[in-house]
Amino acid sequence: MESANQFLKVFRVQTRRWLFVVLVVAVTHLLFQSLLLPYGKALRSLMPDSEVGVHDESGLPALKSFSKSVMVRNPLTVNASDLMSDSVFKGSLEDDEDSKFGSDTGDDSGLREVDGDTNNGIVSEGKGQDNPIELVTDREVDDDSVAENVKDLNDLSELEIERIGENSATVEPAGEAKQSLPLKQIVQPNLEIVSDGVPEQHTSQSIANIGGEKTLSIVSPLTNITHLKTEESNASSAASSAVPKSDIATSVNISALIGSPGKKKMRCNMPPKTVTSIFEMNDILMRHHRSSRAMRPRWSSVRDKEVLAAKTEIEKASVSVSDQELHAPLFRNVSMFKRSYELMDRTLKVYVYRDGKKPIFHQPILKGLYASEGWFMKLMEGNKHFAVKDPRKAHLFYMPFSSRMLEYALYVRNSHNRTNLRQYLKEYAESIAAKYRYWNRTGGADHFLVACHDWAPYETRHHMEHCIKALCNADVTAGFKLGRDVSLPETYVRSARNPLRDLGGKPPSQRHILAFYAGNLHGYLRPILLKYWKDKDPDMKIFGPMPPGVASKMNYIQHMKSSKYCICPKGYEVNSPRVVESIFYECVPVIISDNFVPPFYEVLNWEAFSVIIAEKDIPNLKDILLSIPEKKYFEMQLAVRKLQRHFLWHAKPEKYDLFHMTLHSIWYNRVYQIKPR
């Protein structure tokens, strides 16, 4: 009996122990299931056996290739081998709603139209052939260019979420005309740059259409944010059928961009905190030219002495009020410009770095909004007059990368993280400094880059801070340095084989439209422009986005050719291709963009051929234009026609054309920046 009781005691103890062990195992299992459920695949992708390292012999950062497929916004199929060797790009390109009625800046979310000079959108790159990729590109939508840190998804406002949805998913706002939207493309393997301790945040998107209600859900595994995009009622549907599609799209965009009060907005959707007037820019430029700001070189160079001698000759140029080759009113000082240009043509030598792999380096884009950086790259790398093979003979050093191709190749869609792009260029600069002695001599002050993408100021910050930067996004409040950096014209090229197609416009007497604008409502400013002037005055042809089709594109061009003044408002960023389009079609540009430094500002007198209006003066736009005397208008229109030659690309560069003007401004700023040893 006693032994039976002991047996029962032991049995109960063992039973309790087993139950406890089973309970612990069950709880542990449930805990791991709950933790791993959303991130199981992500955690497994971090295992060493799931990745393949790709090494670049040039010393640039290695890309890691993961087996997991990911949806990216790049309209190119890019893989690891493409980045390190000559590649074949296949892009399926569609019309962007803004290309139908004028090009845009920093803000296009669709794909540009492919002209007939490409072979079904397929461009091959052959060894030893001069066959650069001709891509029509779309604008990156996540334009918080000056933000130093990545936004946390917890801080996403309603406006930000709406913007992500509008540009990153195939969403059709209520009542808006059906538009061609960016093509989603699966890229395998996924390319990622591993940055220093910056966690990547992914969002998942879904679209539902429930009972006439269009819903965009943007769900983050960290925050579980859900945002309802729009609601359609029967009444609104009936009303929209009676209104032109472009008007509906305009009203939707205006309400979306103006937003509701009290909501946190992104920087690009808010007016600048400080405004630098054009007169203040003049003072800053003169002050910086009087006092050299570049780093003093660590050791003297014969090339520095040649540049200093050129500076002396430029300043001694005889004053002239007229010139047979140049239209003097276009320039701040036509004599100094001409003398500087002659010295550049006679003296300047540029070393073009061969380091870096395609497609980010040495692969120009010759069509679309970013054509400026592509055309300059193509013409500079193929130039025999300025380019030298011996870096000891060079006055300047060119780093031939494409800011647009950098975004294509490396930006992970919906990551809202551009740290890897900046890290890539940082490591490129470090590899240049380690391999060559020239960077360290001046800290990069005699090096230059040419970049048109809106993100370029952010991507080149700090590690390329002393370089001369030719940027389309020339914002004095976002790091652009007057007197050192160059405002690069943003040129929308529709045909790479014929960049001068449709050039010219009607004579002043046949321009019966006072002012014209049409385009997407990106940023905070354009909705304000339409609020005051759309359908308000027959003399003011102010429109929103126009419907698709070749007819609309030609209508846009004819409007520019027939208008006295062409309105050039900023988009998400300060730059706009409409400035150059206006010159292209001989229409006087009206720039409405606070803190924007106009192209080639160091040598051109923009008051002679343009109207610059403060953003706060939009309500008085017509009064300001009507206050300009007719004689003054004729002088400005003539100046625009004379100016046109300085803003044109040619397959073979011509004297005073856009290639030479860009190179001259880089040379000119270096001349006034250099310090003697």
Image: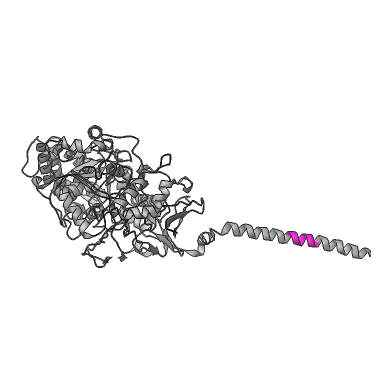
Picture coordinates of residue 439, whole percent (x, y):
31, 46
Which colour scheme appears in the figure? one colour
Magenta part mainly helix, strand or loop? helix
* Quadrant where the C terminus is found in the figure: top left
- The image shows residue 7, relative to residue 269, as above or below, that is below
Q: Quadrant of residue 283?
A: top left
Q: Quadrant of residue 466?
A: top left
Q: Is residue 18 magenta?
A: yes
Residue 387 visible (yes or no):
yes
Residue 401 visible (yes or no):
no
Q: Is residue 480 magenta?
A: no
Depth order, front residue of 44/93: 93
Which residue: 58% across, 56% down? 35
Q: Quadrant of residue 379?
A: bottom left
Depth order, front residue of 79/138: 138
Determine whether, in the image, residue 341 is placed left or right of residue 288: left
Picture coordinates of residue 204, whole percent (x, y):
46, 57
Determine whether, in the image, residue 5 is placed left or right of residue 482: right
* Quadrant where the N terminus is found in the figure: bottom right
Picture coordinates of residue 190, whole percent (x, y):
42, 62
Q: Which residues are magenta?
A: 14-20
Picture coordinates of residue 313, whole percent (x, y):
14, 37
Q: Residue furthest left?
A: 324
Depth order, front residue of 335/111: 111
Which residue: 36% across, 40% down? 270
Q: Number of marks in the image?
A: 0
